[in-house]
Amino acid sequence: MTTDTPMAPLGAAAGWMDDRVGLAHWTKKSLNKIFPDHWSFMIGEVALYSFIVVIITGIYLTFFFNPSLHHSIYHGPYKPLDGQSVSDAYASVVNISLYVRGGLVMRQMHHWSADIFIGAIVVHMCRIYFTGAFRRPRELNWVIGVLLLFLALINGYIGYSLPDDLISGTGVRIMFSVFLAIPVVGSYLAFFFFGGNFPGTTYDYRFYIIHVFLLPAIIVGLLVAHLALLWHQKHTQFPGRGATERNVVGTPVWPGFAFKTTGLLLMIFGITALLGGLAQINPIWLYGPYIPYKVTYLVQPDWYMAWLDGALRLMPRWEVNMPGHMIPTVFFPAVLMPGVAVPFLMSWPWLEAKFTKDNRRSHHLLDRPRDAPVRTAIGVGVLTFFSVLFLASATDELANFFVISLNVVLPVLRYTLVILPFITSFVAFRICKELAQVPKAGKRKRASIIERTPSGGYALRDSEVRPGDEPDEEEPVPVPAVSLNAMADGRPSGASLPAT
Amino acid sequence: MGDDPASATHPASPTELLSPDDPRLAPATHHPRRVAGIVAVFFVLSFAATVALATVYSLGGQTQIEGGLLGVALGALGAGMTTWGKYLVPKGPFVEPRDYEDRHDLPSKPEDREAVVGAFGRGASIFARRKLLGLLSLSGAAVGAVFVFPLRSLGPQPKGAMFHTAWKPGTRLVTAGGRPIQVQDIDIGGIVTVFPEGGENDPDIQQTAQTQLIRVAADPLATRQGPTSWSPSGYLAFSKVCTHAGCPVSLYEAETEQLLCPCHQSLFDVLQGAYPIFGPAPRPLPQLPIYADADGYLRARSDFLEPIGPGFWERGASDGSPYS
Amino acid sequence: MTRLRLLPPLALLAFSASVGLTFFASSSQAQASATARSTLTPVTSATAPTTSTPAPTTSTTPSTLSLAPYSLEDGQALFAASCASCHGADATGSSRAPNLVGLGPATIDFWVSSGRMPLSKPSVEPEPKPSPFSPPEQLDIVKYVSSLGPGGPGIPDVNVAKGNLGDGFSLFVTNCAGCHAVGGVGDALSNGLSAPSLFFATPTQVAEAIETGPASMPRFSSFQFSPAQLNDIVAYVVKGIQHPRDKGGDGLGHIGPITEGLVALFLGLGSMLGILYWIGDRA
């Protein structure tokens, strides 16, 4: 660094730092690191940035929340609760919502971003799955990702339970029943986890520390591992535009990617703030406190737990009775199904490699979904299965909305759950096969122009390429280094390619 | 600085110098000045929203305005930065070799793997002491198990807690407000949640002993669960805890005399003895045997004759259950 | 360009002023939240009344609306024209419609004033709709039908202003939210039945429904709700449900997590994915 540029102070600071830790090589490599430009590669960033919003807003909420289930008679400023027995937890959330300035925006942002966080994980996972990005050498990161999804689900459920309001309290009661349904040790686990029979006065303290410390710590740890692995292994990429198994084509971290991704973080924060201010979520002051014998209709979990709620509704009333013991019906949808689904998801990279006999050492170039019709078909089938379960958690609302009898909706959804995945799966398979026949499918058509030739004949030619129609056909080059001096002098920037 | 001879084989040779007017160094837009203007507008908008937000907050705050302004402040700043990064910097495409330190593939070089094995081999004597290793594993596992002990302190054993409730022979049925109920108090087609007298304010008793008291027209009435003597003057009492997942079964359709659970829509036929006729609930809601005393007060004959609520492993076990 | 040079210092000034204002003005906020907490009176849970619902010590007969000003003759004429074809000229019912004698003014008024009766077609399920009769005409009919035989509750005279919201909220959740949902939106019951939304019910209709248990709804006796408690519930329906305190923004239909999830996924995540589509390459 020379000292006669406007960037001199920065250079001096960097020099001071490098004298002590010597990270110039690492920093240079990081600034030059290439991120592929395809939009779908940023879905994981949406999840990451939503998580950052969750953490920031969540920390603020902890300054006001009181996880005590001790009940008192409310005589606060909110009149509809006057004279009601409420827990400290519930009263503190009412206070955050109605009487802490800016508190409701923070609380609603926390809830919205949690919902979006998990949605983004699911979409991100679909992207990874349908493009085959989980294949060797990235199986580990797939497993970490599935774990992250699972932990985020649990932490969301526990967070939703904290305010001890009418709806979430009912959800906790169902959680207790799910613990009970575990064979052999169920009632012991339930009593140990809840500190006795439901409801007791213990569980909110435990939920709280699990929600704000234990699970976030594990999630952050896994997230660091997820990102470190991604950074180290480098991105996958779609074929085309000079992309090969041996390189990565795209935008370097500095400056393009850094600006774009920071802007994305801020925009995600901004959208969450808009939702947090304009769309009401979980208005617990309208729901009232949880009292064990009180309940409301339309009692639902947040969307990411709806598949389990739907499974509970669709499950036929099978109970396994043995002399002196039983396996309750709740076991099958709420313990067995996730107990099978999560390991199945985790082991998918190995299952697929086994069945396709794919033993290539590296898969840095991605498949398009149509290139792997069987994988795509299976993925669509599984997604359909979970979507039907998701719908099933609103059987009552569907019946009400479409004015059909509840007694019709339930059996219809039961059959749909079993049959529809096969149909969508087959349709997806056929579409993949058809698309594979048409190399240019999905690309915008170019107009044909008919011209009269000077000799009087007619000639056909394609119209000019419109911007954005065709990928840039330029040969990609290594990230250049540019002299800051040249920039300071206002000269056109000269660029030299790096030695590496 | 990590010179890699292999990158020389890359299409764009590192010795080549990019000319300043190389298209790959040009910004992605053809109108940089106009885009810079848009970016400036975004930044000014963001700043204005921030100032407005601070003002609104200081004046007492309003959720919708706060959220809206915060959204604009953050969103416009982000949109400006992204526009800048997308349109005003060299558009590329750029490429880097997929190299991992000194190699082109993730697996380490064979000699490095060898070296690791060699380094580990320094401790070969350790693996020779089989018995000592066995002892180490044993003690290690034992110490690990010690850390499981405190889990036992997290809660009491369930023991009989799942098998009985606070209902006792002769306990009066009272409302949530603590008022005992006489036979004339509830109309036919009426329903009220009742508790054992004295327990109506204890959340744990509320949870396990909550009972739906329903008055139907049929009298006398025997259900599949209980004889006519359990339903004085058409009063039927059923546990309010769903046998499916434990929600309070609180929807009563008086015309069809059916109870519906709000959580998963199990339907119970009251006149049959709350037998499940639709949905996922596997068992009827246990019926509480009740009678009317000389003054007309409704009282429990006993506790429920079977465990209330959702199923669990020990349910129906001959040991631990007072109802074996 | 020179004017732009003034922008940074001006902006800095505006920003510091607003930040200063923020911290100055927010000192009162801390006090407000502190008082909100201290108003909780701790009590031992064993003795705490879960709902402050005092035993009704006063008369259990609610005050009712007097039908004296209304016309028996007009009522008879309207009944003959619009109701008698199904319920019979003497209102004792037929194979198509139930007996109305002895049900009392509250029942008749509920069905007529909510527009559920008369049915537009005999086969359809009764649904609330604008009544073809003016309010005085409705009460004429009520007076006529009630005159045919004694019995049944009178039209309850409710006073929303006097209701206690705390008691009303608590009683509503205990007794009504199971079917109508805590937001009052209503939902499907079994066998094609449904609990209606409470958004458009009048205070009198709410009280009448509680007392008479129309259709599938259970009937609540005067033992269960004193006149004051009835009034509390009606007040909560009007103030808490028909005019909910949506401090957080749009209420999203007060349906709860279903609409919230859809908004989070389609509006929130959807717009974010749209932004990605703008930022990134699409090829």
Image (cartoon, coloured by chain):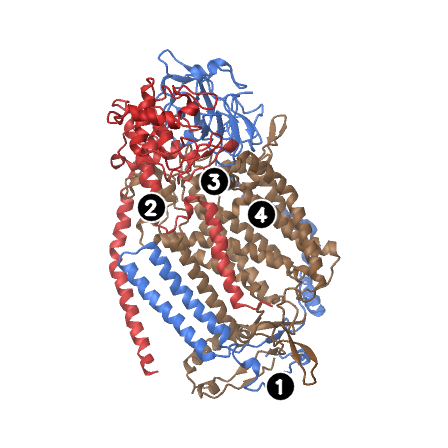
Q: Which mark, residue A387? A: 4
Give the answer, above or below, for where A29 lies relative to A148.
Answer: below
Can residue C222 be seen here? no
Instruction: Pinpoint residue B78: horizontal percent, then vertical percent.
Output: 44, 67
C243 left or right, relative to B83: left
Chain seen in blue: B
Cβ–Cβ under 8 Å for marks 2 and 1 = no
Instruction: Pinpoint residue A61: horizontal percent, then vertical percent.
Output: 38, 52
Respond whether the residues carrying marks 3 and 2 are from the same subunit. no
Give the answer, above or below, for where A201 lies relative to A139.
Answer: above
Cα distance in 3D space between marks 3 and 1: 65 Å
Q: Which mark, residue B16? A: 1
Tell me the chain of label 3: A
Respond whether the residues carrying marks 3 and 4 are from the same subunit. yes
- Which residue lies under the disc numbered 2? C245
Residue sitting at the far right: A357
User: Hue of chain C?
Assistant: red
Q: Residue at x 53, y 78 (%)?
A: B90
Q: Residues within 10 Å of mark 1 (few under 14, many from 20)?
A: few
| Number of numbered markers | 4
Cα distance in 3D space between marks 3 and 2: 24 Å
Can residue B134 be seen here? yes
